[in-house]
Amino acid sequence: MAELHYRSAGAADVPLLAEMNQELIRDEGSRNKMSLAELAQRMAGWLGAKEWEARLLLCGEEAVGYALYQYREQGAEAYLRQYMIRREYRNRGYGLAGIRLLRERLGDVPTLSLDVLDANAAGRRFWARAGFVPDYIHMRLEQSRPADPDLGRAPNPPSDDSACFDPSVQ
């Protein structure tokens, strides 16, 4: 088996990274509707920004996945924005091996954090196998969603309004 290693991604890798990003978006069940061209433009922006690092995970010369991350908290944390292994390479040990290599690369950085979509059960299982534990829950409310007619209604309303409303306070 060829050696698994990372190499820094450059402008020539943007089309491949965008394709893998699109595969990641589909596989994790993301709401992201960006086109391949938009994903490529966004990836090119990240590659041009000093705060982001993109690395291709290679087996020999074949790209099996990638990692996109940045250092935060004055180097006390690395945030892994995107990590993906291409479908044809999954369930063969590349994912966990890639995380081990990334941790080695990060060296003394004490914390590696990431976000996982709640609907992505396979992703949550993978990250748990890699040693990650849940840290917080991020929730959202879509304003376009119809409001629940019972939202805010007291389960047992008082018999008169005076218990909840003081007309002298306006």
Image (tube, helix red, strand yellow):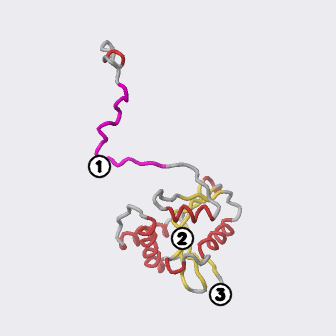
**Residue type of the residue flagged with mark 1:** Ser
- At 30% from the left and 14% from the top, the residue drawn is 167
Where the C terminus falls, by quadrant?
top left
Q: Which residues are magenta?
A: 138-156
**Residue type of the residue flagged with mark 2:** Ala
Magenta stretch: includes residue 44: no
Residue for badge 2:
54
Q: What is the magenta segment's predominant secondary structure?
A: loop
Nearer the observer, disc 2 or disc 3? 3
Identify the image quadrant of residue 148: top left
Task: Classify mark 3: helix, strand or loop.
Answer: loop
Task: Classify mark 1: helix, strand or loop.
Answer: loop
- At 39% from the left and 70% from the top, the residue drawn is 41
First along the sequence among labels 1 and 2 = 2
Residue for badge 1:
144
- Measuring from the top left, give residue 50's x and y in whole percent: 53, 65
- At 71% from the left and 61% from the top, the residue drawn is 108
| Circle 2 residues within 10 Å: few <14, some 14–19, many ≥20 | many
Q: Is 114 on the left or on the right of 158, as rendered?
A: right
- Measuring from the top left, give residue 3's x and y in whole percent: 65, 84
- How much space separates mark 2 and mark 3, taking CA atoms? 24 Å
User: Who is closer to the viewer here, 23 or 128?
Assistant: 128
Q: Is residue 67 above or below residue 71?
A: below
